[in-house]
Image: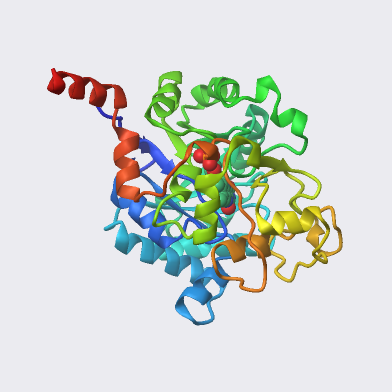
């Protein structure tokens, strides 16, 4: 009695578990490739991949070349099983090249959020592999999905699946005000029910994300009608993730009280951003000890990065690059999901996948029979 497979477009994933994209550099070729090897869908994050791959391979990689390389390296580890790429709409200047480079490298699925990916099918359609790649937007409401469906009509494409991400997710969440993030109607189970009404009409598989921690959580969302789940923080806490050792140490030690939604100071894209409060970079921002500085410019709103001249924002790119050991002149910034406090150890992807697909009640029951 294990979990069903997840089928969408021309993809078949052995288990209905997607490892969410985690930038910068945390869900890299190694993590994504290993997750896919053990039957989930591994997803690379495209955020700042030019910096990540140039650092790893000690060369000069453009965004397009870096995305292609990271996907093809992940596919070697996954032994050819499907690989996804997560591309944030907010990475405006790298967006098109991230899409096309991932397709050059053989990506199977593109997952895109942090803004509405209204232009995604148009960019994909210019590539010879357009029909092979599944397109999956991330939304936090049925209204957002309705807008995407309408905009994609002109490209004659529907989303091949949709991720609905609730307020317990790691990284940015889809709200700007804390009272909205904590509102009852925005709890993941309520968002799932709302979005399912729409996805049923169009026959689009739904993927639930945000605060999904164990086998029982996965079953809960499958029983509600979801086709799969997406999980981030559990995969961050693996040997294979690109998080620094200090990041992993903070993750296993953090308590509920250590986890907060950063607003002011917060992310330059203005969406709430979940942090471990003890992150050195966040503490620096709280105490206004760091001169606002953005020398990266990956995340732009209306053409500018608000972290350039505003102490209400912190430069998440520099903080996150430090947390994957790439930027060495900055302190580290740690983002996690709202249930990170339940994680007590770093384990291998193989062990994590085994744990997630196994019903612990049956294991317990078998042990009791054996002991009698
Ligand atoms: C460290 C970290 C980085 C993340 N980076 C991204 C990202 O670059 N793009 C994105 O769409 N989602 C990002 N996410 C969200 C995850 O893909 C996933 O949907 C979310 O973490 C699910 O919630 P969970 O962590 O409670 O499982 C990130 C999450 C974490 C924990």
Residue 158 showing in the rendered view:
no
Q: Is residue 190 depicted above or below 139 in this figure?
A: above
**Viewer-side residue, 6 vs 10:** 6
**Viewer-side residue, 310 vs 59:** 310
Q: Position of residue 94 (x, y in %)?
A: 63, 64
Residue positioned 82% across, 64% down in the render: 292
Residue positioned 39% across, 56% down in the render: 239
Q: Quadrant of the C terminus?
A: top left
Residue positioned 74% across, 51% down in the render: 267
Residue positioned 58% across, 60% down in the render: 47
Name which quarter of the figure residue 34 lies in. bottom left
Name which quarter of the figure residue 258 lies in. top right
Q: Is residue 118 depicted above or below 362 in this figure?
A: below
- Looking at this view, name the residue that lies furthest to the bottom: 59
Q: Position of residue 127 (x, y in %)?
A: 49, 61
Q: How is the image coloured?
A: rainbow
Q: Position of residue 364 (x, y in %)?
A: 25, 23
Residue 189 showing in the rendered view:
yes
- The mark tally for this picture is 0
């Amino acid at each position: 009695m294990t979990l069903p497979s997840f089928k969408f477009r021309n993809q078949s994933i052995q288990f209905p578990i997607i490892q969410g994209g985690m930038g910068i550099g945390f869900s890299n070729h190694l993590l994504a490739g290993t997750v896919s090897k053990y039957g989930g869908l591994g997803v690379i994050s495209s955020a700042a991949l030019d910096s990540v791959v140039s650092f790893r391979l000690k060369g000069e990689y453009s965004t397009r070349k870096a995305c292609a390389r990271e996907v093809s390296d992940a596919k070697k580890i996954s032994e050819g099983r499907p690989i996804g790429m997560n591309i944030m709409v907010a990475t405006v200047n790298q967006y098109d090249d991230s899409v096309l480079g991932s397709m050059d490298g053989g990506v199977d699925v593109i997952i895109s959020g942090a803004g509405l990916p209204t232009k995604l099918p148009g960019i994909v359609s210019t590539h010879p592999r357009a029909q092979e790649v599944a397109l999956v937007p991330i939304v936090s409401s049925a209204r957002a999905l309705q807008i995407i469906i309408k905009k994609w009509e002109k490209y004659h494409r529907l989303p091949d699946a949709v991720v609905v991400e609730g307020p317990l997710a790691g990284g940015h969440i889809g709200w700007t005000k804390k009272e909205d993030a904590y509102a009852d109607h925005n709890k993941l189970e309520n968002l799932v029910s709302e979005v399912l009404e729409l996805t049923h009409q169009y026959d689009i598989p739904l993927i639930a994300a945000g605060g999904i921690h164990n086998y029982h959580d996965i079953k809960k969302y499958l029983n509600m009608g979801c086709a799969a789940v997406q999980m981030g923080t559990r995969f961050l806490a693996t040997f294979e993730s690109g998080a620094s050792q200090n990041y992993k140490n903070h993750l296993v030690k953090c308590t509920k009280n250590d986890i907060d939604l950063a607003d002011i100071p917060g992310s330059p894209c203005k969406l709430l951003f979940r942090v471990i409060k003890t992150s050195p970079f966040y503490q620096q921002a709280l105490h206004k000890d760091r001169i606002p500085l953005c020398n990266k410019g990956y995340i732009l709103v209306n053409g500018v990065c608000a972290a350039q001249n505003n102490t209400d924002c912190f430069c998440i790119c520099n903080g996150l690059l430090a947390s994957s050991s790439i930027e060495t002149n900055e302190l580290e910034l740690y983002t996690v999901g709202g249930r990170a406090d339940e994680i007590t150890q770093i384990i291998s992807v193989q062990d994590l996948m085994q744990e997630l697909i196994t019903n612990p009640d049956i294991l317990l029951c078998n042990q009791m029979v054996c002991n009698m």
